[in-house]
Amino acid sequence: MRGSYRIMSAPIQKAAYTAAKSAIPAASRAVAMSEAENIVPSATSSTETSMPWEGWFTSFLAKTLGDKSYQKLRSYVVFMPQDIHNLEQQPLPGTKVTLTEDGKITAQFRYPSPGSQPRVSQPDEDDGTMYEDPYVGSYYTRDTRRRFDDPAFPNPELEAAKLAILPEDDPRVNELRVNFEEGPKSSPGNKGNFATGPSDIEPLRTAMGTNHALMNASLDDNMPDHLPAPNWWDEQTKVVEWHKDRKLPIPIGRTEWGTIPTRGRLARW
C-alpha cells in the first residue's frame, strides 16, 4: 500500500533501509563538475529502483494472502486502487501509460530522456541582416528617429532662442549654454562589473553596462544613408514633354497606372 513503510517502527525501518542500501545501483552516484562534461546521458531511465525498500509491506501481504485476497483488501483500504501511478503526483520513469485499447502503444514520463536528445539548433539571421544573433531585441541602439531628442531639452530650437536673448555675461546663462551644447549625459556604465562579478556580455545588451558613447556609435552604424525618391524621378523630363506635346497641364509627379480610379484619370473639359 502506498506509503505503508511510514507506519513501520523505527528499528524495522532502519533494518530495511540498511539492507536495501547495498542494492542501490552504482549509476546513482554523485558526479564531480569535472566529470559532468564527459558523461554521456542514457537514452532510457534506469530500470533499477534507488528505493528497493519501497512497497515491501504490500509485497509481503500479496505473498501471504494471495493475489485475489490481497486485491480485495487493497480495494477496501486504498483510494483509487486502479490508478497506475499509485497516486503519485509525478509519474515514475518506469511507469508505462497505455495509449491504445489493445495496449500496444505506450508512453513513459520523460522518455527518451532530454539529455540524450540532440543539442538545440539556435537559428541565425539570414545573410545580409544586421545581427547574426536573432535574439537582439534592443531597440534603443537602432532608434535613429529619436536620436537627437533630448528629454532635458524637448524643444532645442526654442531653448537655443532663449539662450540667444539672455545676457552673455551672466555665469548662470553660460552654464546653461554649456549644458545645452553637451547634450544628454548619463552614467558611464559599469564596464562589465556586476554584483555577481565581471561579465563578458556585450555592454549594449545590458542596461547597466551601456553608456551614451557606445549607444551613439551604434546609432552611427544604423543612421539612414539613402534619399528616397519616387520611381518617376529619373524620367521627369519625359513626363513634362509628354504633357506639353498634348497641351495638357503638367502635373506634380506622374500618375501611376492602377493607383487612381479610371474616373480620376478622365479629363472633364
Image (tube, rainbow, N blue to C red):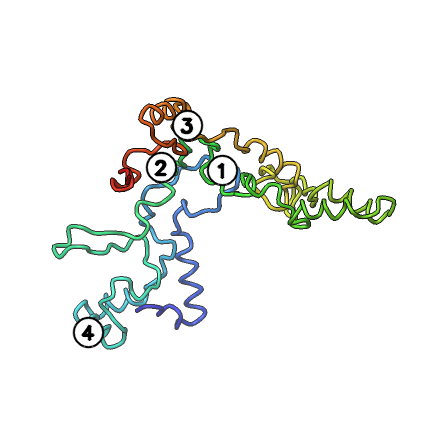
**Mark 1: which amino acid?**
Glu
Distance (Cα) linking label 3 and label 4: 69 Å
The quadrant in which the N terminus is found is bottom left
Mark 3 crowd level (few <14, some 14–19, many ≥20, 10 Å Cα): few
Q: Nearer the viewer, residue 105 or 78?
A: 105
Look at discs 4 and 1 and give the one toward the viewer: 1
Please, what secondary structure does the residue beneath circle 4 have?
helix
Distance (Cα) linking label 3 and label 1: 39 Å
Q: Which residue is mark 1?
A: 35
Labels 1 and 2: the sequence-earlier one: 1
Say which quarter of the image contains residue 268. top left
**Mark 3: which amino acid?**
Asp
Q: Nearer the viewer, residue 16 or 188?
A: 188
* Contact flag, marks 4 and 1 (Cβ < 8 Å): no
Labels 4 and 1: the sequence-earlier one: 1
Distance (Cα) linking label 4 and label 1: 50 Å
Labels 2 and 3: the sequence-earlier one: 2
**Mark 4: which amino acid?**
Lys
What residue sits 48% from the left and 46% below the top? 30
Labels 3 and 1: the sequence-earlier one: 1
Q: Nearer the viewer, residue 40 or 140?
A: 140
Q: Which residue is mark 2?
A: 118
Distance (Cα) linking label 1 and label 2: 20 Å
Q: Which mark is residue 72?
A: 4
Labels 3 and 4: the sequence-earlier one: 4
